[in-house]
Amino acid sequence: MAWNVPSKPILVKYGGNAMTKPELSDLFCKDVIDLSNQGFKFCLIHGGGPMITKLLSDLSVTSEFDPSTGVRISSPEVVSIAEMALGSVGKGLAAGVSKSGVLGVSLSGRDGRMLKCQVKDGGRIGNVGEVKSVDGNLLNSLLSIPKCVPIVSPIGSAMSESDPTVYNVNADVAAGAVARALGCDLTVFLTDVPGVLDGDMELIEALDGAGIEELKGEGVISGGMIPKVANALDAAAGGGRSVILDGRVEGALGKLIRRLYGDGGGEGGGTVITM
């Protein structure tokens, strides 16, 4: 197959079912390896909520979610444990893609002060960070290495170098911010829904900012889909496009890339979002 390989990287926010089901995780890693060997450049941002919850439980640390936002209330102790859990997830993912000449490199958003944050909601939910700026130098250096895949966990630093605060960051938010900073050609949000659905529960194949605002006004886009499309739009602000894609579909990433950059024969659906 002849691939139309973009010069700019593709960012994938990886989590949910694609992460917790071994068979889907294996297929995801295989897609990244195969496509990297075809010349595609990938950067991965991963979550790890279930792994964080398990480690907190193993260490007998109480953790609660804010009922108004669904965000984990993040004391300094919770953030420290989240960083440990996410580090383990990242190393496992790096091992999964480090085959056939591909180099997976696991990083934290604290490395190179990549994710610089301010406290969200005035600290009401603890050390949850709102990403204010992204330093892409380290990622761009890694992406310049052939077949190197940087893998980032969503942990951030404070804006000031003298402030030691460590922040827990939502992985979707981190993905949108990093994709914009890198000017990614495509950002893929793997999730547990087929994409954005219309009032008849049918998949909407493409949306832009104006269409999103219209559907929000009609109540078609509501609840948890609102932050998903907001982060997808944030990513697309770098000049590319985003896709909200069903990570429960086997080989979803490979099918999407084939559809967008190959012979057009891939399946897997998803909603393409542009500015």
Image (cartoon, rainbow, N blue to C red):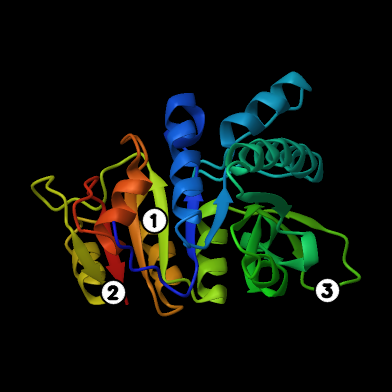
Q: Amino acid at mark 1?
A: Lys
Residue 212, by quadrant, is bottom left
Is 39 placed left or right of 154 in the picture? left
Question: Marks 3 and 1, Cα distance to the nearest angstrom?
Answer: 29 Å
Residue identified by numbered label 3: 160
Residue ID for mark 2: 209
Which residue sits at x=40%, y=56%? Answer: 188
Label 1 element class = helix
Residue 143 x %, y %: 62, 66
Name the spot of residue 191 as percent of width and height, x first.
39, 44
**Element carrying mark 3:** loop
Tell me the residue at 66%/33% (across/down): 52
Decide: is 200 above or below 274. Answer: above
In the rendered structure, the answer to whether residue 109 lies left or right of residue 231 reads: right
Is 259 left or right of 68, judged from the image as shown?
Answer: left
Sequence-earlier tag: 3 or 2? 3
On the image, numbered disc 1 is attached to which residue?
228
Judge whether 59 appears above or below 15 on screen: above
Extreme residue toward the right, this view = 162
Q: Residue at x 28, y 56 (%)?
A: 1
Tally the numbered discs. 3
Three-letter amino acid code at the position of disc 3: Ser
Where, by quadrant of the figure, is residue 208 drawn? bottom left
